[in-house]
Image (cartoon, grey):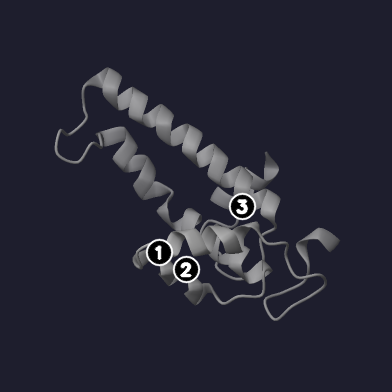
Amino acid sequence: MNLIIQCVTTKYVNFSGRARRKEFWLFNLTYLILLFLSFGIDGYLNSTDANSGYGFISGLFILILALPTIAVSIRRLHDTNRSGWWYLLTIVPLGIIVLYVFYCFKGTKGPNKFGPDPLAQ
């Protein structure tokens, strides 16, 4: 739980350093659960736009957590000793699949060019 709270407080827009797999996957799982909850609240309040499928609550939720989501993804890439520029694969068709494969890889043991090993701390 501390890893998730840390992602949205102290590491809100921290694109440097490394994020271990546990931090990345717990953040994304919590994000998805809360996103579906916000969709449910929008459906209950009848505030969902017919064209976009988003409502006020879900749109605000996505907007607020856009930067922490990108930041934790880039820090996860750093843990696998890849540059954050790899995140631009999200704009390429099927590039997100390549990124999720990278996210599943074990991080570099010991320090790498992006910082110390988060598991060693």
Residue drawn at point x = 23 percent, y = 36 percent: 53
Q: Which label sits on residue 87?
A: 2
Residue drawn at point x = 67 percent, y = 76 percent: 114
Residue drawn at point x = 73 percent, y = 62 percent: 106
**Of 1 and 40, the residue lying toward us:** 40
SS at circle 2: helix
Residue 71 in view: no
Residue 58 in view: yes
Q: Position of residue 98 (x, y in %)?
A: 51, 64
Q: Position of residue 75 (x, y in %)?
A: 60, 65
Q: Is residue 78 above or below residue 55?
A: below
- Estimate how packed mark 3 is, as few (under 14), some (14 to 19) or many (20 or more) residues with alpha carbons within 10 Å: many
Q: Quadrant of the N terminus?
A: top right
Kind of residue at badge 1: Thr
Name the residue tied to disc 3: 24
Instruction: Give me the C-alpha separation between circle 3 and circle 1.
Output: 17 Å
Name the residue tied to disc 1: 90
- Circles 3 and 2, Cβ within 8 Å, touching? The answer is no
Question: Is tag 3's residue or tag 1's residue first in the polypeptide sequence?
Answer: 3
SS at circle 3: helix
Instruction: Give me the C-alpha separation between circle 3 and circle 2.
Output: 14 Å
- Circles 1 and 2, Cβ within 8 Å, touching? The answer is yes
SS at circle 1: helix
Q: Which label sits on residue 31?
A: none
